[in-house]
Amino acid sequence: MDLLMIVLLLMGCLLISNIIGHYIPSIPTALIQIALGVMVALVFSGVSLELETEWFLLLFVAPLLYNDGRNFPREELWNMRMPILGNAIILVLITTLAGGYFIHWLIPSIPLAAAFALAAILSPTDPVAVNGIAKRIQIPEKILNIVRGESLINDASGLVAFKYAVAAVVTGYFSIKEALLNFSYTFIVGAILGLIVGTILTQIRFSLRRAGIRDVIFHTLLQLLTPFIVYLVAEDIFHASGVIAVVVAGIAQALVKDKTETVLAEEQLLTENTWSIVLFILNGIVFLLLGLNIPSTMKESIENTSINNWKLMGYAMAIGVVILGIRFVWSYFTAMYEFKKGRDEKPTLKTSLLSSLTGVRGAVTMAGILSLPFITDNGGIFPERSLLLFLASGVILFTLIVATIFLPLLIESNESGEENEDQLNFNEAKKKILLASIKQIHREMNDDNRNVAYQLIGEYQQMFRQAQLDGNAAKSGKPEHQSKITNVRLTALEIEEQYIKDLYEGHHLDEDMYDAFKTTFSERRRVIQHNMQKGFSYIFYRFLREWRIARKKYLLDKEQFVSYVRMKQVVRINAYEKALIYLKEQAQMTQNPEIYFMISFEYERALDQIRKPVTTNSNRQDELKDELRVVITETERAEIHKMYEAGEISREQERDLRRFVNYIESVNLYEHVD
């Protein structure tokens, strides 16, 4: 398959993964993308895209780590420098040595040097996958910052260790002194080069700006190119660590940004928006490529009849357990050391387990293992290459799946109190949605829809004030409370239905109008009761409604059509008033009138809308308002999903908020006369 078609296919999968992640936020997007990559590889046999390690690091790792460096909190990075450096350097070395000996003991056919190479490339953590899990659950901030901080460095340390272990296999020669000297050189020189080159590029931007070149697109593009320039200078010219160089350059860029962002607001806005798009694409393609390469890396080992496939999977799981176990032990003892020094709280086994499970493996591991050579210097085949590829792929999947399953369980049992404190109650979440709606109306406002936009803003401001007046907010998100709201709404709807039925039976309503009202009541009941999706019936009803209006408009002359619409308005108003009388009577009779007051407000708002004068030009205003409401409704649903992903609301609250939005949508839909 052509490269262009492969890229387009991957971009399509990227969009699909985002849609799936929207509906199943409990599964990390990284895992969804890996699964899609595997499916593409299995369905399209001609699809394969293998990148050399250096190209992969340049195209993906360099910009991603540069962005992490420029966005990582500098105070946190400095305050946690010891645990971060410990995890990024010492833990990598321990994992390489202990993991290597275990792999060689478990599978003696893998030479010790090759086992060290596998353990070394399994040592770097992948913060992108962790971030995907952290969107939904509240991983403790300290653990998350350590994982993000160590990932800025451990890619370099893991790759250096991997490089020397592979060299030992290929050449049969290894010197620990040379390895330590080379690591020190690549680390220190890479950091210095990152600082120098990053500063030079920043000064170039400032000089060009002073010279009058203030094109924000130019400066944004220069910032996007910075990580590639820094990486190439460090790697190709000075043979230092390009990974460390881009991290330091990112941190240096962040320090400059803090001093200049108020002056360069337009550039900062464009740069951040552009970075968000670039990062979305890079992060997604990294995991799609990972999934794309998994079948080919596993194929040879699975087809090898001398090794049982179940045994192979057992090996991968055992190595994954040991790798995570080493991290668990390290986390516990370093936390105990910090506690004895009086710098931290007493560690618990759960906290250490959380720390170990966040150490998932990912893109760098896959990129490194795919770079294994096929032959050694003496002309022999690289020992157990296909098996090493299988084990690395298996460990990546194992750590991702284990983290996805067990992290939420540990957080729920260990951090449930903290999470509940951080969560919004139902009323607060509702107000947040209404505020987002008002902001969206302002963004959509133009000369054509200005009048209806201000009407909508007034409606949402009223709803916001009503939410503020709700004195029973603490229980308003509970299932039993929502059930009472549903029952009261259905009772009010039945009163409307009975009024319309009495009119029809008394021959005060023609059959065509009565059928239209029955269809309306049926659809409203469906929305009130439980349905969370608009579905086919919603679309069909909208089509039917527009068709009926158009038919009446063309069959009748303008004055007759306006008269027909006004008559239906009168009937609708009378039905609403009957329900409103019932609600106000019940509010006087009950000890908890909040629900009746809330629903009364909804009816009063609908009455205000349909009491407006009807003219032959009012259809255009309704169309403009409908267009705005579609945008607002999607904004509200997106805000609910965003709050759910961030852990601000529970699953039950998310359902109730969607019901709230659906109900408002149904009121808006039927406040016009059909």
Image (spheres, helix red, strand yellow):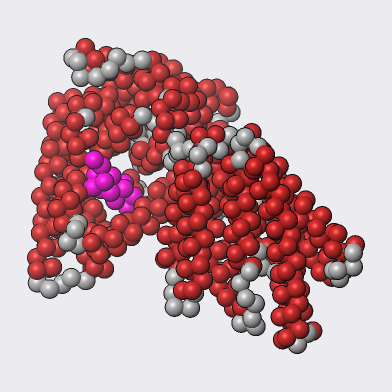
Q: Residue furthest top?
A: 340
Viewer-closest of 326 and 214? 214
Q: Is residue 255 above or below residue 182?
A: below
Q: Is residue 633 above or below residue 531?
A: below
Horizontal side, residue 227 vs residue 605: left or right: left
Q: Is residue 162 above or below residue 243?
A: above
Q: Is residue 198 above or below residue 394?
A: below
Horizontal side, residue 513 vs residue 630: left or right: right
Q: x, y (%) of residue 550?
A: 73, 78
Viewer-closest of 55 and 356? 356
User: Residue 24: in sight, yes or no?
Assistant: no
User: Residue at left 23%, top 26%?
Assistant: 83
Q: Judge whether residue 72 is colored magenta.
A: yes
* Count of marks, rendered view: 0
Q: x, y (%) of residue 124?
A: 32, 33
The picture quadrant where one finds residue 664 is bottom right
User: Residue at left 46%, top 25%?
Assistant: 416
Viewer-closest of 376 and 593? 593
The picture quadrant where one finds residue 445 is bottom left
Q: Judge whether residue 110 is colored magenta.
A: no
The picture quadrant where one finds residue 341 is top left
Q: x, y (%) of residue 277?
A: 38, 57
Q: x, y (%) of residue 613?
A: 62, 76
* Secondary structure mostly taken by the magenta-highlighted segment of the chain: helix
Viewer-closest of 116 and 240? 240
Which residues lie in the magenta part? 57-73
User: Residue 579: in sight, yes or no?
Assistant: yes
User: Residue at left 75%, top 73%?
Assistant: 567
User: Residue at left 37%, top 20%?
Assistant: 351
Figure quadrant of the C terminus: bottom right
